[in-house]
Amino acid sequence: MTAFIFRRALLSIPTLIFISFISFVIIQLPPGDFVTAYAAQLRQSGEYLSAAQEAMLREQFGLNDPMLVQYWRWITNIVFRGDFGFSLEWNAPVSTLIWDRLGLTLAISSLSLVFTWLIAIPVGVYSATRQYSFFDHLFTIFGFLGKGTPDFLLALVLMWIGFAYLHIDVGGLFSPQYQNAPWSLDKVINLLTHLWIPLVVLATGGAAGLIRVMRANMLDELGKPYVETAYAQGLSERQVVWNYPVRVALNPFISTVGWSLPALFSGDVITAVVLNLPTTGPLLLKALQTQDMYLAGSFILILSVFTVIGTLVSDILLAWFDPRIRYA
Amino acid sequence: MTDQALPAPAAADAAKENLYTARPWQLVWRRFRKHVLAVVSLWFLIILALSALFAEFVAPYDPFKFERLRTLAPPTAIHIFHEGRFVGPFVYGLERERDADTARVTFTEDRETVLPIQFLYRGHSYSFFGLFQSDLHLFGVDDRREQVNLLGTDNLGRDVFSRLMHGARVTLSAGLVGVIFAFVLGLALGSISGYFGGWIDGAIQRLMEFIRSIPTIPLWMGLAAALPIAWDPIIVYVIITLILALIGWTHLARVVRGQFFAIRNEDYVLAARLAGASEYRIITRHMLPAMTSYIIAALTLAVPEMILGETALSFLGLGLRPPVVSWGVLLQDAQNLRSISLAPWLLSPGVAVVLTVLAFNFLGDGLRDAADPYGQ
Amino acid sequence: MLDRANMPAMDDDTLISVRNLKKYFPIHAGWLRRQIGEVRAIDDVSLDIRKGETFGLVGESGSGKSTVARLMLRAYTLTDGSILFRRGSGEVVDISRLSERQMREMRREMQMIFQDPYSSLNPRMNLLELVGEPLVIHGVGSRGEIRDRVAELLRVVGLRPEFILRYPHAFSGGQRQRIGIARALALNPSFIAADEAVSALDVSVAAQNINLLQDLQEQFGLTYLFITHDLGMVEHIANRIGVMYLGRLMEIADTKALFSKPLHPYTEALMGSVPQPDPRGNRTRKRIKITGEIANPANPPTGCTFHPRCPYAQERCRTEVPALRPVAGRQVRCHFAEDLNLSGVAA
Amino acid sequence: MDTKAPMPAERLLDLEDVHVHFPMREGLVKAVNGVTYHVDKGEVLGIVGESGSGKSITARAIMRLLPRNAQAAGGRIRLRPRTGEEFELSALERNSRAVRQVRGNHIGMIFQEPMTALSPVHTIGDQICRTIQLHMGLDKRAARARAADLLARVRMPRPQQMLDNYPHQLSGGMRQRAMIALAISCNPSLLIADEPTTALDVTTEAQILDLLRELQAESGMAIVFITHNFGVVADIADRVAVMYLGRIVETASVDDIFYAPKHPYTRALLNSIPRLGVDQGRRLPTIPGMVPDPFSVPAGCAFNPRCTHAVAGVCDVETPPQRQFANGQSARCHFADTFAEAAHA
Amino acid sequence: MLAEQVAAGALPPVEERLPANPTVVNAMEVGSYGGTWNRAYNGPGDRWGPTKLMEERVLKWSPGEDGAAQLVPGYIESYEVNADSTEFTFTLLEGLKWSDGEPVTTEDVRFWYEDIFLNPEIVATIDPTFAPGGEPLTVEIADERTFTVKFAQPYVYFLQILAKDSTGEPSLDRPSFIFPKHYLSQFNNKYASEDELKAAAARFSVESWKNLWGSQGAATSWWTNPELPVITAWKIETPPPAEVVTMVRNPYYYAVDQEGNQLPYIDRIEHRLFQDPETLNLMVAQGQIDMQDRHVGLNNFTFYRENEARGNYHVVQQIGATTWSLVPNLNVEDEVLRGLFETREFRQALSIGIDRELVNELAYSGLAEARQASPITGSPYFDEELEQHWTEYDPDLANELLDGVGLTETDSAGYRLRPDGQRLAIVVEANDPVHSDTLELLADNFADMGIEMLVRIIDRTQWDNNRTNNTFQMQWLPFDRLSVVPADPRRMMGWDGFANQYFVWYNTDGESGMEPPADHGIRAIFDLWDEASQAASVAEADEAVNQIIRNVVEAGWVIGVVGEEPTPFIVSNNFHNVRAGLVMDDVHRGVGLAEPQQMWIAQ
């Protein structure tokens, strides 16, 4: 097992190096650099940078160096000093910016992930054990509806419903009065009244697919002889289903844990933008739009690294969870 | 002696013989037909595709034509009885008024003007893909000023239904192009990976892992900004779609590879080899046909992803942009509270997206279920 | 290694001669996946099959009998050894040295029948395409001729020619097996390897198909390599039998001789294990039953690979690898073949 | 037959006219079409038949483990285990408490494919312990001890260690032993073994058969042994029932079946089996034709189109009744008496 | 809020905090203290939203009785300009204090002048606005409160420039002339050792001490550094990046209302972060915004109006000082296109071929005004004739004119062919999908003239870059600064618009950019500005400026479409003293003209 993990980790290293380089290239793709973006932004509010000032800024930020030199400076700082650089846009170290928002992001993402699972697994199991029943069809249709509705549209419509019909505060995670208030029961309740929309939006999108996966897996597993064996031991249907086939059918879910790692980190960008969630996703989007090089680059790098790690984690978890692979 | 094994000639059981000699796709079709939702979806998509293809004919109005006196008109109510008298489907004229205070435009029905809906109506002329000129439309009302707007109009007085039909053409074809490109790549690399295995497989797997770890949104944003501005937005979009397909193929490749691994070990493949079949023949005659239905199902399920991708990118301002008419672009118009509160009919492209995605999903589901006629 | 000078010349009546056939798979392990050893799936198998005979190959699953057949047909690449084959033209070819392309031509003369009548027929092809495929591949005849030939073949194997457009799913297991036989016959091969050809079939159907195979052998002068784990079946159909254990041949003998008096303890044990449809006989018959299970080929026992399960094993068996050697006109791989008095099943 | 008759004292299991139907696209399949048999305490009943004869379905009907689309279309199944209570299984709900109490507890079952019949993600020990805890109310530790004990009883090497192994770590024979341990874990009165040796090598098969015989001798449980292999039946069974197309065509003691079969099907089948040391090179007698497909079972005697003794106007019209013979043998053939005399002659 | 702090002894009483003669800001009505002003901001780049609420200058624009903007003294007691506008003398308020209570003196002016303005490490190049004729301004300190700014040549528009740009880099968003020496000297290389500077840079986690300076400098930017002493009405409390950026009132603010109450009335301002404009609209409709000027657009006008009751607010309309225009690039690299753009008849055709009323009606809900790009109503440079120049919709004449310039050949699709045989197509770039409706209408108008308009909505950054890099053909641009034109005349001179390269040539004395042809009208514009900037009197200068405007508008270099559109302010019903009908121009410092320090919230 350790050999397996070690080998997989070793194989990821070249991928990571390549990925870091690609991350750097992606943010260099658009014409112009941070200074032009910065100048444009100043111009928007009636401030102008002269050519000389622009040149000075470029010199200051080392934007005139060859790309490889810039890359090398960037990556060595990250690897050897844990220094992700400085966000020119926010005037703050990248790590602080990301760190600030990571807590809530992780909370919302994992909550929605758990929520998704709490929906998907029982519904998938139900649909499989009662294949072609009324509720199976109903869940199927709802699942596809959830899958077929663009997230931003759903978020917008839910927001509208909350606003126009339920007359509740929507958008963000807190009403203004609780925004900076210390944690209290009221604040938690306020959070919950805001949280349902993002949870519903994120969960419908994710659950739909997982329900299908779970259902299909369960149908496969339910037909296998060991299920019959379990029944033949006198176990009740509930005991049989939840102890045996569900346990096997969950394997693909376990591999999605790893895959969700980058998503946990970035949250769902679009939903977060629409719902004004204080997560890292909108920060990423903004960083890309303003070509905030170090912030955007760090984001892409972290996302990519998380993807690679996620794959690794999935493989390991799967191996660990499924004895057939573990002892293979 | 061997004649022993001959079954007694069955009583002319045509149905059964039919089943026995049916081509594989016929069996797929038979199983598919049992899937009511999938069949309905198929029809829906066929009608949609035809409408998109013949958008000029189906759409009563020019999707780019402004009507200054019909901005944000709600969907036209279609009546049948006028003052208790049967007239057949008709619409009333509209009277427009702008609220000086809130600048809202309101419409009231002018109960005097009765405009019967005409089918195969001669309206504005158009050129069908540059092939021929025509002015024939599926329906319309014969009036210089009044219109029938099934889904209302937008803030420039353009007919939303007509735009929806034209948008379908762009959205569906752009989605297909991307999917097909991803499909070609995925099929090629997946089958190479699955057929040869060994270090080639290892290399391709590594490549896939690498490609999958590139985050999409940043890449898209970078590309969108990097392409020359004077290029036609549709071409830019298609190019970006193609480049994204360079990433999107991994999913299909994994499916194909898995299938190849499974089928490679089937005895009938070995049998073909022992019959002296070349690798090309084995792949094309034995392995691929076994996968076609899976692949078609996978494709069917990939198209809605592309459609949703288009709308999401439009939302981020990275996809198609006006004046191109696509569903994403139309939805962009509607994705604000202003539209939801003042002109909810502008959300109809959203409904179209949901229905289409739904239909593709049902179709894909049906195909997947029917894919293996020899499954049970 | 094969010693060319000592290679026995192939007798005129020998169709196929296998010498020192080996198939090893590397084993990788550890952090760097270095090769740490090999699985000797087939080790040093030599056998001759005479024209027109049926050579039976028996053994437990995992003994490598199927692998031998597939190696002989070059379905797999072999690690070492030679396979001499006498073509219809009389020319003797070492097919172990042919390229895949050259081999394609040879495939007209050597064919295979598979165990699983379900997975061995492409469900997406009808009988015309299935049975006609070898004809198409080798460019034999026009479309019409192929159709006629397929109809003829179907008739030969006892299927109605009017079913030519049916797909395999329309047929029962036994019939499918016949389709497989028809396909194997399509190019008039001289040699057919039947890999557990009737094992998956019900008794009554298996009997029909066995009879068919015997009829076809007579009719077309076929030579069979008949692989099975069913001793009753192999005794019934084979002229000579090879007994395999853990990738090695343990004993080769004429059927009658083998069954009446096995020379290898494994052969005896195998026979003793077979339950007979004869309750009284079962009760009275002395049955040597084998203990334990076949060893892992990646980690075979030292000395005689059979010694851990052998009731007659002695110290020498643990250390010394016995050679396949001629004993009383047969070949046996046992140190004590001459000393043991083993019991067979002869009536 | 008197359906109200109480079960004789020695009776363990009694099936009366059991029917199981499957509605299919092509028509109604009567997979089990009036099966009647019984098992006495401590005896081994072999059930032989070719694939599609309904032998496994009947076994599942006893366990109330039929697939969801199956229709239990009649008949009565009664069980009186060692404990003395009597269950009318056919009257119980599919997954009812009473049925679950019978399953695993009074009746153990072994399946053909030991690889797939055990959960791949649970250890052998877990799977056995679960059953023990369920039916015997033992705590975890006691259950584990018993499980180890059971593994030892099925001659599993290193039973303690084996408890923590997963099925895929074991060889086929070992898996089947584990499966047997699971089936007998609660001292059932009846063991239903559905083709337990078909997937195994002859050498292993012989070991498993020996094991079952020993276990049966030790515990006195009865076994219903389902197989298509006459050799196996001859080896293990006390009595044999032969099935063809959803019906029992003949029941008799094992010797009578093999040496004095009264149904043409049994005779033909026995003839078509090559026997060691007997049939060398001889052409095998076969049964003409094929088993008809289950949608078009012939009228009258289902076997009549393939029967060399069929008499037109009788066999293809009338369903033959069950003929009972003094020695306990019974056969569903219009002319069973004729063969009886022929055999004894 | 402050009374409590005074009572607690944390703060001296108000008399001690105010200057001796505080500046009086006339409140619309005398308000009451307290409250938190909720508004929204959309990211760190939005610092101008909060900044413009409270910018301080020596002279500020203030709405007069009639609403017309006029210059009034800010934190100075008085100012004097000599006869030929070469010397400007300012006297700081007596007792003016920084927000930490330290007095503001001419030492702070000296610090600014000597250690910042003339410090090449901090200000690398001095903006031409502060060096007319290439000679930078000089400062003379008279006494503790008085100082004089001198120029080598007359500079009549200096006060307007001060009111707009303050004293330029690095202090655009800070008061003119004064920098808090007692705080900032620790970051200045003239006062601090290299090690101290390094430590300071590390403390603010920037790479070099120079990054502490500049308009976004970590130490000198009020927006990010809560420690920085300011004289503005509010000071930052929670800087970005934060979900809510907060500002609290400055207890030492120098101004009072007409009754002598210290301003501002409002205690705190909280700016909530939003990403998507819809979120802001939702906040508005939900009544979570007290007053918002930025990011509320005309396109949502109806939505805002219809939700007034729901959100308990009303919409106050101001006037935008822009004209949305099609700006052709006279420097475009495509020779043929440049030739056409330089053809007067061609420009006229484009202008009169546009149905401005239609655009106004459909895309601006009829709320804007169809007009040419020219000074807006209420501006001293307004001219009705210029406003209507070439705005009469006459497609027939437009086509005639185009035929007249030789564009008579057409292709199969009906588009005119350029002299080189290509289809006459013009790429028009805009930076926001909001404009796509307008541009589709314009494209339709162009099509009627046989010209294909290829509309491209591109990213803002790219859109700006294209002007800087001279890689655009035509842009859809808000032609702004149309009220007090001489405060920033560069728009009219082609800068960052219709002839950026010519302007660069002019601005760099021919070092870079493109030289305009000898007979090009833009040369006259440059000459006129030279005249205006050296004029000794305002009248003389204004004459030249008016001539510039007339020349530019009549040449039709910019094709104005609609402008003077109402700029909505969202004002909560308990939020008071928001004037209506003000001209919102960057020159006036936008919302600053409405004097937020005198706004108050009913408690």
Image (cartoon, grey):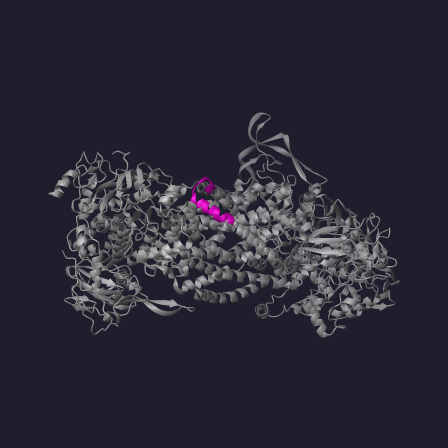
Which of the 4 quarters of the picture holds residue A301? bottom right
C288 above or below B125? below
The one nearer the camera, C298 or B126, is C298
Residue C209 image point, x, y percent: 21, 50
| Residue B238 sits inside the magenta stretch | no
Q: In the displayed image of the protein, which residue is found farthest to the left?
A: D345
Q: Identify which residue is drawn at 61% across, 67% down.
A: A83
Residue E118 image point, x, y percent: 77, 70
Residue B83 image point, x, y percent: 60, 26
Residue D339 image point, x, y percent: 15, 41
Asked whether residue A65 is in view, the answer is yes
Side of E14 where C230 appears, left or right? left
Q: In the displayed image of the protein, which residue is found farthest to the top?
A: B84
The one nearer the camera, E529 or E51, is E51
The one nearer the camera, B214 or C230, is C230
Query: Which segment is the magenta one?
Result: A118-137
Give the main secondary structure of the magenta stretch.
helix
Side of A261 where B156 appears, left or right? right
Asked whether residue E498 is in view, the answer is no
The one nearer the camera, A135 or D25, is A135
Side of D40 where B197 appears, left or right? right
Looking at the rendered structure, the number of numbered marks drawn on it comes to 0
